[in-house]
């Protein structure tokens, strides 16, 4: 059983470390939604479906310092609205009853949920 989100994050992190301009990501689960959110936040330039994978165009200049998977299959991490923090350096994705939202979107809606991962950028 694969964890699609972890595979996505590892592919992106490896490509950034290797100073690549593109990363190949397997489709599955919510990967397309996650890539759209990362693109809207400016962490990637874009992506396109290319056969059996997504070809992700990375942002030059290494805007991501760290990608950290928070919630895993065996260890779910839920945060209430009051435990979420606004930050300019931490961006995260949360699974809520309204779908996948960024931390700021969840705070604006006044809801919490399962924190999938953090992106640190300094």
Image (cartoon, grey):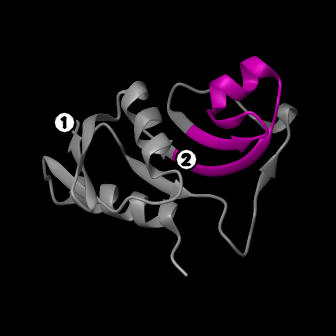
Relative to 115, residue 52 above or below: below
Percent x, y for residue 64?
35, 42
- Is residue 107 rendered magenta in the image? yes
* Distance between the alpha carbons at the discs numbered 2 and 1: 19 Å
Q: Residue furthest front?
A: 51
Q: Residue at x 41, y 25 (%)?
A: 40
According to the picture, the residue beneath numbered tag 2 turns out to be 118
Q: Which structural element holds mark 2? A: strand
Look at 82% across and 38% down and name the residue there.
83
Q: Quadrant of the C terminus?
A: top left
In the drawing, what numbered circle is on residue 47?
Answer: none
User: Which residue is disc 1 drawn over?
Assistant: 61
Q: Taking 84 as reference, is 47 left or right? A: left
Residue at 53% in and 58% down: 29
Q: Is residue 82 above or below residue 29?
A: above
Q: Residues within 10 Å of mark 2 (few under 14, many from 20)?
A: some
Q: Nearer the viewer, residue 59 or 89?
A: 59
Marks 2/1 in contact by CB < 8 Å: the verdict is no
Q: How many marks?
A: 2
Q: Nearer the viewer, residue 31 or 116?
A: 31
- Quick one: quadrant of the N terminus? bottom right
Residue at 19% in and 36% down: 61
Q: Which one is in front, 90 or 109?
A: 109
Q: What's drawn in magenta, residue-wise?
A: 92-118
- In the rendered structure, the answer to whether residue 6 lies left or right of residue 44 reads right
């Amino acid at each position: 059983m694969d964890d699609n989100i972890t595979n996505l994050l590892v592919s992106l992190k490896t490509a950034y470390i290797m100073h690549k301009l593109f990363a190949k990501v397997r489709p599955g689960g919510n990967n397309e939604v996650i890539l759209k959110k990362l693109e809207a936040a400016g962490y990637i330039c874009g992506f396109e479906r290319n056969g059996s994978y997504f070809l992700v165009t990375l942002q030059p200049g290494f805007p991501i310092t760290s990608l950290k998977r928070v919630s895993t299959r065996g260890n779910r991490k839920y945060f209430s609205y009051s435990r979420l923090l606004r930050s300019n350096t931490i961006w995260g994705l949360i699974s809520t009853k309204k779908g996948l939202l960024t931390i700021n979107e969840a705070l604006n809606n006044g809801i919490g949920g399962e924190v999938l991962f953090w992106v640190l950028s300094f």
